[in-house]
Image (cartoon, rainbow, N blue to C red):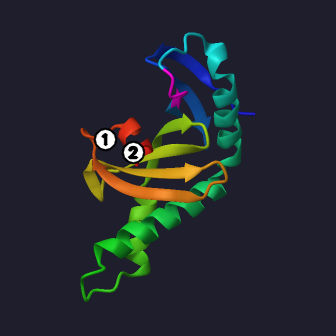
Amino acid sequence: MAKFKTDEIDEGTLEGYITIGGIEIEANLDLENDEAKTVDDFKDLILQTERFADYFTDEKQLDLKQAISKEIVGLAFEQDEYKPTDEDYLNLQNDLELFDLYTFYGGFVLTFSAKNNFPCCDVVVQIDEDGTIDDIAVYDSDEFDDDEFDEE
């Protein structure tokens, strides 16, 4: 089972790291309660995060990256006569790299970089506990705030 590595608690958010697909990424667990003081306050979210890390296999990551690519590339050419090719979809899919996980009760926000396609932006995906996509967005890397995405 994946293990969450604790770093610190900051304003009700437990910051740390988790390994997904062999890569250690930043993970933030948010109780949405600024009064959380100890790691024990986060035990349910830690378990939710660890279960997700085990669930989110390479195959599941590929499925999610395909869905992200389909959505973003499809929207990019929606108003254009150009019809995206398989190569267009694969280009973005292969460029997506997960680097951050934000956990809250009932779901997750995953943040990917796509340096070749969106050098100054992050691709942000909100999914529920079952892995169903709730939202996909592209944000300027300097402007994205996990809390703002969660409130949408």
Q: Considering only order in the chain, which callout, 2 or 1, is on the residue closer to the N terminus?
A: 1
Q: Is residue 95 left or right of residue 17?
A: left
Q: Position of residue 134 (x, y in %)?
A: 51, 57
Q: Residue furthest bottom?
A: 81
Of residues 61 and 149, which is closer to you in this image?
Answer: 149
> Circle 1: is it few (<14), some (14-19), or many (20+) Cα within 10 Å?
some
| Residue at image mark 2 | 149
Q: Nearer the viewer, mark 1 or mark 2?
A: 2
Residue lying farthest to the right in this orientation: 1
Q: Which residue is mark 1?
A: 144
Q: Relative to residue 90, is residue 137 depicted above or below?
A: above
Q: Give the SS element for disc 1.
A: loop
Residue beneath the point at 60% across and 40% down: 20
Magenta span includes 1: no
Left or right, 18 with reference to 83: right
Circles 1, 2 touching at the beta carbon (< 8 Å): yes
Expressed as whole percent of the image width and height from the top left, the position of residue 50 reads: 68, 34
What is the magenta range?
28-33
- Under circle 2, the secondary element is helix
